Image: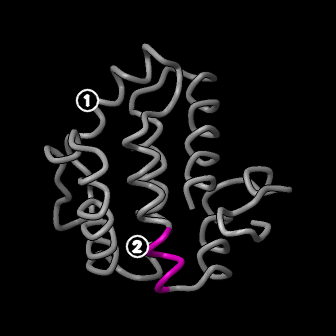
Amino acid sequence: MRDLAQRLLAYEVGVGKNSEPIESPTLRVYEKLRQSLGTSVGVAGFYSLASRALVLARPEVPSLHGMQISEDGALHGLGEIETEIDRKNDRAGEGGIILIARLLGLLRLFLGEALTLSLLRNAWPCEVFDDRDSGNGRKA
């Protein structure tokens, strides 16, 4: 799932170069996931998945301890830190990759790979998934 998270974030970094970015690539990916999944699993379902993903990511990325997820599923505190990192490095931060990878991993666990990829394809163009490995030896 890490590979897939990196591809989604790399795509959003590229999209951000075409216009003036107002949020970090991680926050853009997160919000697309929240919008796409909110219709399928509901606000409470997404909140549960996102909260668990954040708990799983925190031991690997101590800077995520200041992040919070509100009851509507919105992520608070990540954008300010990552926007500064992204502008310096011109890439998505490691913390963002890990957070998104944990969220995608939970989605795959609970929804299955086919449904997860189907939901992702609704939010991102197919070229993000073409000829790539989804992180577990299968084509995405």
Q: Which of marks 1 and 2 precedes in the sequence? A: 2
**Relative image position of residue 2 (x, y in whole percent):** 55, 55
Name the chief secondary structure element in magenta.
Answer: helix
**Relative image position of residue 78 (x, y in whole percent):** 27, 40
Figure quadrant of residue 34: bottom left
Q: Residues within 10 Å of mark 2 (few under 14, many from 20)?
A: some
Asked if residue 108 lies in the magenta stretch, the reply is: yes
Work out which quarter of the rendered image holds the C terminus and state it: bottom right
Disc 1, SS: helix
**What's the residue type where badge 1 is placed?**
Glu
Q: Nearer the viewer, residue 25 or 101?
A: 101
Question: Which residue: 48% across, 75% down?
Answer: 107
Residue that numbered label 1 is attached to: 80
Q: Nearer the viewer, residue 127 or 102?
A: 102
**What's the residue type where badge 2 is placed?**
Gly
**Relative image position of residue 32 (x, y in whole percent):** 48, 55
Q: Which residues are magenta?
A: 105-110
Figure quadrant of residue 119: bottom right
Image-based side of 132 in relation to 8, left or right = right
Residue that numbered label 2 is attached to: 38
Front of the two marks 2 and 1: 1
Image-based side of 30 in relation to 55, left or right = right
Q: Is residue 50 above or below residue 93?
A: below
Disc 2, SS: helix
- Circles 2 and 1 in contact, beta carbons < 8 Å: no
Residue that extends furthest to the right in the rendered view of this protein: 131
